């Protein structure tokens, strides 16, 4: 598979302050990947560096095997064969949908431009709206026009900077799946920057979690959730609680709710005080189980209810129950642990 993007230990600075430290990754043709992290983590700066809008203090960026950024050299953005989808869509309000999409196709003949616009509007499902103006479209339709405009010149790479942040939560999830389907059908390669893990997981074949300017883990959504490589990723991705425990053997931990053998060996030595990550799907309902939890909080989620349960030893866990299992606050419910992916970390400093 052809490699479209490669970052080799890039560093970016604002004045004398480093905001991106030693980030390395690569993206293959046809892959959709995401940079995910909280505000200020450096993810947008990485995207700007790939686009050619921010210089490198160290490292190198390659596109299609050629160097486009390194200290002292930056190929102009317009020569990088990139498509950009911005947070505010940046549509021209005085142009129709067709004119917006065809804006970057001025090098083509009129017939070729019209054919390309019609083809790409069909791909994004807007072929009947080419005479409308942006203010006549919904937020999701505007998003698809912005995507169509980025796709029309057939760039090697699409860059998307928080493209769904102006949509409401329900539409954001739906549109992110639509965009993934459009990009996959078009055979596009894309990098999305977002702070929303639901967007990242809906769109990304691979996701990179960033924190404080560093890329902590570059992996599949499944592995980020079940196999986080550090405590920050474990805490940032998904829901869960950390329970104090002790290492009984390299692959065995002891907590207040029992002794459990995991799917990996830890190197810290028998007796080490640890924190065990327990996800809501690790704690399953078991009406006949010996372990009981008291309902302290509940959140109805349609098909499921997320319960916060206080354990006999005082700790708390989260558990997802089918929504017909409706318990009141203070009720005790039977549960058991099914932690196929046991995740533990040494006790963080300050928590002893």
Image: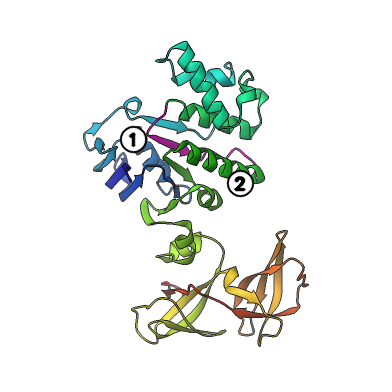
Q: Nearer the viewer, residue 114 or 93?
A: 114
Residue 155 coordinates in the image, percent (x, y): 39, 30
Identify which residue is drawn at 47% across, 49% down: 204
Which element type, helix, strand or loop, lies under badge 2? helix
Residue 89 visible in rendering? no
Q: For this view, does 50 lie left or right of residue 299?
A: left
Which element type, helix, strand or loop, lies under badge 1? loop
Question: Local crowd at mark 1 within 10 Å, few (<14), some, or many (≥20)?
Answer: some
Specify the quadrant of the image occupied by residue 94.
top right
Residue 137 coordinates in the image, percent (x, y): 65, 27
Q: Residue furthest top?
A: 110
Q: Of the residues under marks 2 and 1, which one precedes in the sequence?
A: 1
Verify whether residue 167 appears in magenta.
Answer: yes
**Quadrant of image for the C terminus:** bottom left
* Residue indicated by mark 2: 173
Region in magenta: 154-168
Residue 242 coordinates in the image, percent (x, y): 52, 72
Q: Is residue 118 above or below residue 156?
A: above
Q: Is residue 214 above or below residue 223?
A: above
- The secondary structure making up most of the magenta span is loop
Identify which residue is drawn at 66% across, 88% down: 290
Question: Local crowd at mark 2 within 10 Å, few (<14), some, or many (≥20)?
Answer: some
Specify the quadrant of the image occupied by residue 181.
top right
Residue 247 coordinates in the image, percent (x, y): 42, 84
Count how many numbered circles sit on residues in the image.
2
Q: Is residue 318 above or below residue 335?
A: above
Viewer-side label of 2, 1: 2
* Residue indicated by mark 1: 54
Identify which residue is drawn at 71% across, 79% down: 333
Q: For this view, does 84 lie left or right of residue 73?
A: right
Q: How is the image coloured?
A: rainbow
């Amino acid at each position: 598979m052809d490699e479209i993007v490669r970052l080799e230990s890039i560093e970016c600075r604002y004045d004398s302050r480093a905001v991106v430290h030693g980030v390395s990754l690569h993206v293959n043709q046809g892959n959709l990947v995401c940079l995910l992290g909280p505000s200020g983590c450096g993810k947008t700066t990485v995207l700007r560096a790939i686009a050619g809008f921010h210089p490198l203090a160290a490292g190198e960026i390659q596109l299609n095997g050629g160097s486009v950024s390194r200290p002292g050299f930056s190929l102009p953005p317009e020569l990088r064969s990139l498509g950009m989808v911005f947070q505010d869509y940046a549509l021209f309000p005085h142009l129709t949908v067709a004119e917006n999409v065809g804006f970057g196709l001025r090098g083509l003949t009129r017939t070729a431009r019209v054919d390309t616009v019609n083809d790409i509007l069909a791909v994004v499902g807007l072929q009947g709206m080419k005479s409308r103006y942006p203010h006549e479209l919904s937020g999701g339709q505007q998003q698809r026009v912005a995507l169509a405009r980025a796709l029309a010149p057939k760039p090697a790479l699409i860059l998307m900077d928080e493209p769904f942040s102006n949509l409401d939560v329900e539409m954001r999830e739906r549109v992110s799946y639509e965009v993934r389907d459009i990009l996959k059908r078009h055979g596009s390669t894309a990098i999305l920057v977002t702070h929303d893990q639901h967007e990242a997981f809906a769109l990304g074949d691979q996701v990179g979690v960033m924190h404080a300017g560093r890329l902590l883990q570059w992996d599949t959504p499944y592995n980020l959730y079940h196999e986080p490589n550090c405590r920050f990723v474990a805490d940032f991705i998904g829901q869960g609680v950390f329970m104090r425990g002790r290492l009984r053997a390299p692959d065995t931990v002891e907590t207040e709710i029992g002794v459990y053998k995991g799917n990996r060996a830890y190197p810290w030595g028998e007796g080490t005080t640890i924190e065990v990550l327990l996800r809501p799907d690790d704690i399953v309902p078991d009406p006949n189980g010996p372990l009981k939890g008291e309902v302290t909080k509940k959140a109805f989620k349609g098909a499921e209810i997320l319960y916060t349960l206080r354990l006999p030893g005082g700790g708390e866990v989260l558990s997802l129950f089918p929504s017909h299992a409706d318990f009141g606050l203070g009720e005790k419910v039977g549960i058991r642990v099914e932690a196929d992916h046991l995740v533990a970390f040494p006790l963080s400093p300050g928590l002893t």
